[in-house]
Image (tube, helix red, strand yellow):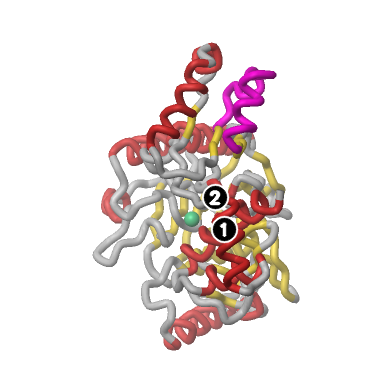
Amino acid sequence: MNFIHSADFHLYSGNRLEDFTASLWQIANEAVESKCSFIVNPGDIFHKGTPDNQAKTVFSKWVAFLKNHNIKIFSVVGTHDYTRESSSLSPYKSLELDNLVVYDSLGIYKEVVNNQAITFLVIPHLWKYTDESTLKEIQDKIKEFSQIKDDSKKIILGHFTLEGSQVSDSFTILKGQSDFILNLGIFENSGANYILLGHIHKPQVLTCGKSIAHYSGSIEHVTWGEIKNELGFWLVNNWGIPEFIPLKTRPKQILLPEELSSILTKNKEELKGKLIQVLINSTNSNIFAEIKKKVTDAGAIIEVAPLKMEKKKEIISKEELEKLVNDSGYTWKEYAQEKINSVSIEYDKQLLTSQFEELLSKGKE
Ligand SMILES: [Mn+2]
């Protein structure tokens, strides 16, 4: 039996939905070609707890296609799917579809797929994650899970941060940082065949003793801070070791206005089909419009393949940032760390980290 592990779809009409959709279909096609019986998604199918119709349509078509190919989906409510009253997946759960299973609470679930018994231990996004009792509850479930001695395959599906996981090349989650962070060590005697996770957008494998955990990462870059992350998903053949299958995604490039000008003059073909972000150190919308016009005036690029420009968030100039850092008496690294530590929500922390990475690399030039 074969299956795919892919998390963090982040479907949202406001963020390059066609690019995310393209990734989704690569996964579906691979699932069919590799004769997968099911796909697991440990969280964040949608970017919003109340997803828009476009995003819902994309997902619904995907589910229908997989249904026609007799491929089941096991999904978990993630941070982004979650709202206090319900979740983006609640309507799907209510439909009781044959091929889409929605897990929205901590628990052990027994399933049968093509005559193969599978036991899932599911740890979705949990609202009261700071609660000591939540950790106790999870530990009790792991114990209960470990005591199941039957012929079923045992899979842990979770949407949380593991201590030691890498958000980006230069940022690793350490113990004691806020958010719902678990140590892989707690799964040591779980007896799980696989620990398949969502939440961290960089694909990676973490090990601790007998425990091996996989993050699939996201299916497209959700933020600009993530653009260095490789993109793909895990394919498991015949209950073997997961194999990383890369996704073909739109190339992206961050440019300073002068770099853009240079490319437009020398080799505008280079921009074809790329997603470009131009860093402008001004909030003046005229300047943004002027840059956009320059790109649009290159005409042929847009005609051959759409060149998109995402509106850049306000960003301070290199000089201003240097002054801020110098005045603070910190080194660049300390300054960035200080800013990152000042936010309390882990996801914001990750985004800020990614943004800082970008700022710092530009700042050093
Ligand atoms: Mn996510």
Badge 1 marks a residue whose secondary structure is helix
Labels 1 and 2 touching (C-beta < 8 A): yes
Residue 143 rendering spot, x and y as whole percentages: 55, 82
Task: Name the residue type under label 2.
Answer: Ser
Q: Amino acid at mark 1?
A: Leu
Query: 282 above or below 180?
Result: above
Q: Point out residue 68 in the picture as x, y percentages from the top left corner.
A: 44, 33
Q: Is residue 275 above or below residue 280?
A: above
- Residue at label 2? 317
Q: Residue at x 60, y 66 (%)?
A: 325
Which residue in the protein does label 1 denote? 321
Residue at 60% in and 38% down:
256
Q: What is the magenta range? A: 256-275
309 relative to 48, above or below: above
Between 19 and 104, the one lying in front of the other is 19
Residue 311 shown in magenta: no
Residue 1 appears in view:
no
Q: Is residue 269 magenta?
A: yes
Give the x, y percent position of residue 107.
43, 72
